[in-house]
Image (cartoon, grey):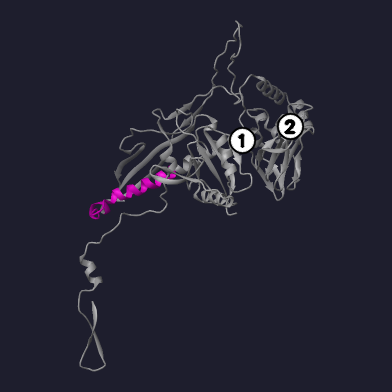
Amino acid sequence: MVNEVKTDRGSEVETRQLSLATAAARQLATTTKSLPQMEGISPRWLLRMLPWVQVSGGVYRVNRRLSYAVGDDRLNFSNIGARVQIIPQELYKLPLLRGFEGDGALIDTLASRFVQREFKAGELIVEAGQPAEHVFLLAHGKANKLGAGKYGDPIILDVLADGDHFGDQAVVESNDHWAFTVKATTPCTVLALPQKVFEDLIKQSSQLHAHVEKFKARLKKPQDKMGQAAIQLAAGHSGEPVLEGTFVDYELTPREYELSVAQTRLNVHTRVSDLFNDPMNQVEQQLRLTIEALKERQEYELINNRDFGLLHNADLKQRIHARSGPPTPDDMDELLSRRRKSRFFLAHPRVIAAFGQECTRRGLYPTVVEVEGRKVLAWRGVPILPCDKIPITPARTSSILVLRVGQEDQGVIGLHRTGLQDEVEPGLSVRRMDINEKAITSYLVSTYFSAALLVPDALGVLENVELGR
């Protein structure tokens, strides 16, 4: 401590130390310290909310009823300046061409026959009642698919955006007409293929002709509203009519999910673990932070992995676009209406903030519910959980997921393998490896996991929601 002491020199003031300074005292004191801290640790709600299923064989097979509904997906395009082209291989994603194994040159020719068209906001791309003579691919922009209500008023049937397509039936049915209107809500770039061009290619290729005939025959098979092979039933009859026989058919090539892995090798010098292990265990703290990073990567993969990630495995019929840009209560209601027993929403924190702003703008106040002891925002009683692993694109758009979970409800489930050697928690092991010539000890940290969609409507995605409006 420093104090001022007045001496006999009159106005002169002499300063001298009267007690031990804190800088010196600190050398003799034991510091109270925290554990090593780490930025980037999130709540990881997806890992906590998914029901986890033990996969002893490393592979989980999802058996389903046979479905006649042909797979579908969104298309990707290439461009040189303002000129847009469909990537030929992307045409295999169209229901009509799914599974076609013919000449690749034919697909290249088909891709080159699409004609680029531009539509301004408010223009009609197709009009109900007009001849349906084209296949349309929406390369860029947003459009509303409109129908007529009971009293003639227009209703929005669907929202179309980048990568969507319509008019596939135009090339397999002659003299048909559009049953709906498609109206551009933003400037749209569209690629159109005339029906006559496709018919000419069918005449030139026997393989393509056989494939189209097979597609037509598949559409004529009895199926329920979900596209599954129908189970023949009788109801409301009287007397003793002859009942039709039936059976439940299964898919012959069901989807199989192989467990993925996230691993790393942690290195610790023996000098550090021998000399600096008090009061904190250095190896323990190194492992703790490494495991946290591994779990963050695990959740990222469950969201973004192209093979089993939720964003890439959602069925096209369960993906919808935001009608006006930012996420609105209308969009959330539409998302909920497509499935039963929705357990929770999953969204980026900034998307949740954007939804809150839309509710405030409308004078609505979402409810708050408690999940595992924490209060979170909810819509219609379904909690909206934050997940910073859902990407935000450079165009400031993102997605909102809604899940039904559990095997009992035919929902989304997590897959893992427990009972591993040197397991420190379910599905995560830490194995000590050898000490190398530099006296460094290595630890192999591994976790095996995946996620499975039991039926398509277990997962829904609201795509291209905008931020910052």
> Percent from the top left, x then y, of residue 27?
22, 67
Q: Residues within 10 Å of mark 1 (few under 14, many from 20)?
A: some
Three-letter amino acid code at disc 2?
A: Ala
The quarter of the picture where residue 219 lies is top right
Q: Residues within 10 Å of mark 2 (few under 14, many from 20)?
A: some
Q: Can residue 26 be seen at all in this image of the molecule? A: yes
Three-letter amino acid code at disc 1?
A: Asp
Q: Which mark is residue 135?
A: none
Residue 96: say if magenta.
Answer: no
Residue 274: say if magenta.
Answer: yes
Q: Which residue is mark 2?
A: 179
> Percent from the top left, x then y, of residue 69?
61, 26
Q: Can residue 261 be seen at all in this image of the molecule? A: no
> Percent from the top left, x then y, of residue 404?
49, 34
For label 1, the SS is loop
How many marks the image carries: the answer is 2
Whole-angstrom CA distance, mark 2 to mark 1, is: 22 Å
Judge left or right: residue 146 versus residue 348: right
Residue under the point 33% across and 34% down: 420
Give whichever of discs 2 and 1 has the lower sequence position.
1
Question: 109 and 156: which one is in front?
Answer: 156
Q: Which residue is mark 1?
A: 73
The range drawn in magenta is 272-298
Question: 286 and 360: which one is in front?
Answer: 360
Tell me the quadrant of the picture where the N terminus can be found. Answer: bottom left
